[in-house]
Structure formats: structure tokens, C-alpha cells
Image (cartoon, rainbow, N blue to C red):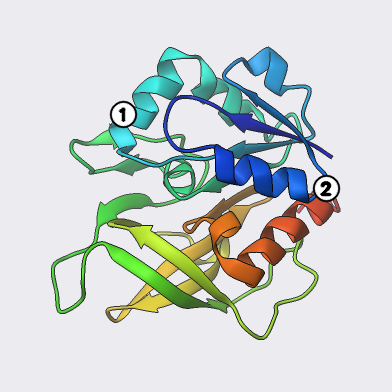
Amino acid sequence: MIIGIIDYGMGNLFSVEQALKKLECTVIVSDDPAVLLEAEGILLPGVGAFPDAMELLNEKGLSKFIQSLKEKNIPLLGICLGMQLLYEDSSEVKSTKGLGLLTGQIRRFEKGTYRIPHMGWNRLEFSRVPYWLDEVLSDTHVYFVHSFLAVNTNEQEVWATASYGGLNVPGVVGNGLITGMQFHPEKSGDFGHHLLEQWISNVRRNLHV
């Protein structure tokens, strides 16, 4: 399978690129929509601040490209900040409009008895299993590092959450061919690897979900 990684200047792409190659994917890394359209699936990575990321995506014409993937029937996976960019807006640094592909907003964890950022291994609890996931393993721990989370979400778009500080933190989300993971699957041990492998193998199973 050919996977395109959107290189817009936010995040270390090496680890996810190597993980995809280990799964026998052909990887295209580019910020050119015409080049990325050669891929069968698109990955939107990201580390850093939401407004900086959106500014770069808008400047490079990548926002409209990402928003067009659904009608083109091209699967999209957003990872970490890439997942957060799929939502309507964020209050990080300043109010910033997101890609609007999923319902909800990105807000900072409120101060409480828990540590911010949310950092460490947490178990994912699946309220529904994504259509692209054949099997949920017995150990669903993945590694989180983030200070902002998705809120006011559509429960039909949240597949799995992690419990942290009394909150149910959206961990795996999606709608149709759009998928997001708040953690880095390529850095999340056996289950993270399993999720990435399953997404690559099965995301085209049903284009009408």
C-alpha cells in the first residue's frame, strides 16, 4: 500500500516513516497535494502548537487538500496534533479554526489533581470497535503526551477513550474514512503497532461507513 505523509514542517516524521516501511508500505513524504494524491492513504502527523500547524497547512494549500480527501475516498489518519487538527477549533495560544472534519473542540486540560501534560501509558477502552480493526488485543496500553484534548465530541465519532484524572480522554476517533489517534501508534508498543497495521490493512474495506 502507498501511504502519503503530509510534511508541513510540524513534527518528527522519521519514526512514523520507518514504522510504515516495516509494514511494507511504500511511503511518500511531501507537502505537494499533487504528489500526495499518488497515495492510497494519507497520514497527518504533528507535534507542536495548533495555530502554527493550521497556519502552515493553510499557507501550503494543504487544508483544502485534506478536507477534500473524504469525497475522493482516500483514507486519512491524524496522529497526535494531527488528530486535534481534525476538529472544529482550538483555544491553544489563541482561538484557531481547525479542519472541521470531526465534531468538537480542542481545549487544555483543566487544572486539577492530575499532572499536565497527560504523559505516560494508559489503557484504551473501546466503546465501539472501528470497522478497520479486526481484533482488540488484551493489552490496549498506548503512550500519551499531550496538554490538550478533544471536548464536546460526537459520541458516535469516539471509538476509544483513556481514563485520566477522572476524564474520558478521546484516544481513537473517526468518521468514515477519517481516523484520529491522540497518541503515537508507532511509539506505543505492541498495541500501537497493531492499530497502525490494522488501519493500513483494512481501512479500505468499506468506503461507505
In this view, the residue in front, 104 or 1, is 1
Can residue 105 be seen at all in this image of the molecule? yes
Q: Residue at x 50, y 47 (%)?
A: 102
137 to the left or right of 105: right
Q: Is residue 91 above or below residue 145?
A: above
Picture quadrant where residue 198 is located: bottom right
Q: Residues within 10 Å of mark 1 (few under 14, many from 20)?
A: some
In this view, the residue in front, 196 or 40, is 196
Residue 59: x, y in percent? 41, 14
Q: Residues within 10 Å of mark 2 (few under 14, many from 20)?
A: some
Instruction: Spot the residue most to the bottom.
Output: 138
Q: Is residue 90 above or below residue 104?
A: above
Picture quadrant where residue 199 is located: bottom right
Q: For the N terminus, which image quadrant? A: top right
Q: For the C terminus, which image quadrant? A: bottom right
Residue receiving disc 2: 204
Residue receiving disc 1: 52
Residue 188: x, y in percent? 55, 65
156 to the left or right of 136: left
Callout in the foreground (2, 1):
1
Q: How many marks?
A: 2
Can residue 150 be seen at all in this image of the molecule? no
Q: The residue tagged with tag 2: helix, strand or loop? A: loop
Q: Residue at x 62, y 32 (%)?
A: 5
Give the residue type that dot 1 points to: Asp
C-alpha distance separating marks 2 and 1: 31 Å
Give the residue type that dot 2 points to: Arg
152 to the left or right of 101: left
Q: Residue at x 69, y 13 (%)?
A: 34
Q: The residue tagged with tag 1: helix, strand or loop? A: helix
- Whichever of callouts 2 and 1 sits on the residue coming sooner in the sequence is 1
Q: Is residue 145 above or below residue 106?
A: below
